[in-house]
Amino acid sequence: MVLTEDPDFPRYVHPPGRELVQAAVLVPVVNQHAGPTLLFTRRTSHLHDHAGQISFPGGRVDAADADRVATALREAQEETGLNPARVEIVGRLPDYDIQTGFRVTPVVGWVEPPVELHPDPFEVAEVFEAPLAFFLDPANHQRHSREVNGLTRYYFAMPYGERYIWGATAGMLHILYRILTGGP
């Protein structure tokens, strides 16, 4: 399904001629008994890109990766220890451009428990799950803007308890919400 842009909420668009870093993330939907959850990571505070932020496992495309699915699965395994054999790929969300120069392909995967995780302590401070139903409730979607270098930047935030999910991750969650519910 291709989504149209929300005219009231413009997304970031890179300037013409900017060379983008290609990346992919896995959007892991875990089939828990109480209902599907999403698996997230909180990045360690010393990382150069997106330090301390909550994200889906993922990263830069390597030359050896066959495609974006391979990138997402490789990165998820490297960061969390998630065995790619436990993941059934169900689709992709539209590419998501980030102000820091990344073009991210979100790859949605269905994960059947049991799941044994071994987070990489250099990259990942925490791995946690949150109910998919929380992100499918539009009341949990906040729209924000801020001024950066004289330009207005727009972003989503979806605070979950004491965890602040915002920016690209929340934007991808909003797109997933729109696809799954047909919502605005």
Image (tube, helix red, strand yellow):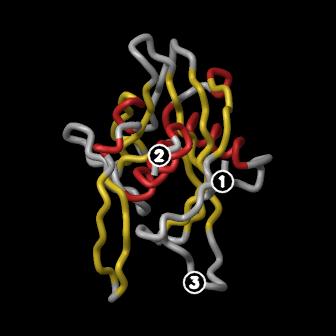
Q: Residue at x 56, y 60 (%)?
A: 96
Residue that numbered label 2 is attached to: 183
Q: Residue at x 35, y 44 (%)?
A: 138
Residue 26 location, quadrant: top right
Residue type at tag 3:
Pro
Residue 133 location, quadrant: top left
Q: Say if 14 sits above or below 155 in the image.
A: below
Q: Residue at x 38, y 38 (%)?
A: 135
Q: Nearer the viewer, residue 103 or 134?
A: 134
Residue 125, given in percent of the width and then of the height, sits at 34, 40
As measured in the structure, the alpha-carbon distance from the residue carrying label 3 to the one carrying label 1 is 23 Å
Q: Nearer the viewer, residue 57 or 172?
A: 172
As measured in the structure, the alpha-carbon distance from the residue carrying label 2 to the one carrying label 3 is 30 Å
Q: Nearer the viewer, residue 6 or 41?
A: 6
Q: Is residue 109 left or right of residue 30?
A: right
Residue type at tag 1:
Val
Q: Is residue 108 left or right of residue 63?
A: left
Residue type at tag 2:
Gly
Residue that numbered label 3 is attached to: 15
Q: Earlier in the sequence, mark 1 or mark 2?
A: 1
Q: Earlier in the sequence, mark 3 or mark 1?
A: 1
Marker disc for residue 2: 1
Q: Say if 62 sits above or below 73 in the image.
A: below
Closer to the camera: disc 3 or disc 1?
1
Q: Say if 38 sits above or below 150 in the image.
A: above
Is residue 5 shown to the viewer in this render?
yes
